[in-house]
Image (cartoon, grey):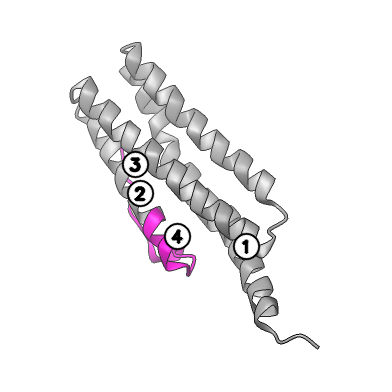
Amino acid sequence: MALFDWKDEYSIGILAIDDQHKRLVSLMNRMLESLRDVREDSCMLDALNELENSVVYHFSQEEVLFQEYGYKKSKEHGRDHEYLMKQIELVKRSLMRNDTAAAAQTAASLPPWLENHILREDAEYVRFIGKNGAAKKQPGP
C-alpha cells in the first residue's frame, strides 16, 4: 500500500488549515502502515480514532471560516466531509469484523480522496475567502 506524501501544491495558504492537512496526511500514513504491516487491531483502531478526531477538528475549523466569510457552498463542502467520515467508519467496521482486506481497500481510497478534496474543494473556498476577505477589509462609503 503506497503512502501519501505531502506536496507543496497541497498548501492552500492558510497556515492553520495547511498544518491540519499535513496532520491528516500523517495520520492516514499511520493508518495505512498499520494495515500494511498487519499490526494489532488495537494499533489500527488507535490510528483510525486519532484520524477521525483530527478530521472532526479540521472540519469544525473550516466551518468557522465558512461562517466568518459567508461561504455559500458550505453545505456541499460538508457533504464531502460526511463522506470521509463514513469511509473511516467503514474501515473501522471492517476491522471489527476482522476483514483486513476490506479495511485496506477502503483505506487506500482515502489519500486520493483527500488530495482531490484539497486541490479542488478547499482551493475553491480559499479563492472565495480571498475575494471576500479583501472586500471585508475595504473601507465603507
Q: Residues within 10 Å of mark 4 (few under 14, many from 20)?
A: some
Under circle 1, the secondary element is helix
The amino acid beneath tag 4 is: Ile
**Distance CA(mark 1)–CA(mark 3):** 29 Å
138 and 96: which is toward the camera: 138
Query: What residue is shown at x 40% (from left), y 18% (from top)?
Result: 93
Q: Looking at the image, do the residues carrying marks 2 and 3 touch, with CB atoms under 8 Å apart?
A: yes
Q: Which amino acid is tagged 3?
A: Met
Q: Does the magenta portion include 85?
A: no
Tag 1 residue: 68
Of 16 and 87, nearer the camera is 16
Mark 3 crowdedness (10 Å alpha carbons): few <14, some 14-19, many ≥20: many
Is tag 4's residue or tag 2's residue first in the polypeptide sequence? 4
Observer-nearest of 95 and 100: 95
The residue singled out by tag 4 in the image is 17
According to the picture, the residue beneath numbered tag 2 turns out to be 25
Choose mark 3 or mark 4, whichever is in front: 4
> Which circle's residue, 4 or 1, is located before the other in the chain?
4
Residue at point 62%, 39% (across, down) = 79
Q: Amino acid at mark 2?
A: Val
Q: In which quarter of the view is residue 18 placed? A: bottom left
Name the residue tied to disc 3: 28
Label 4 to label 1: alpha-carbon separation: 15 Å
Note whether residue 99 is visible. Answer: no
Q: CA distance from mark 3 to mark 4?
A: 16 Å
Report the Cα–Cα distance between label 2 and label 3. 5 Å
Residue 129, quarter of the rendered image? bottom right
Instruction: Indicate the quadrant containing the N terminus: top left, top right, bottom left or bottom right.
Output: top left
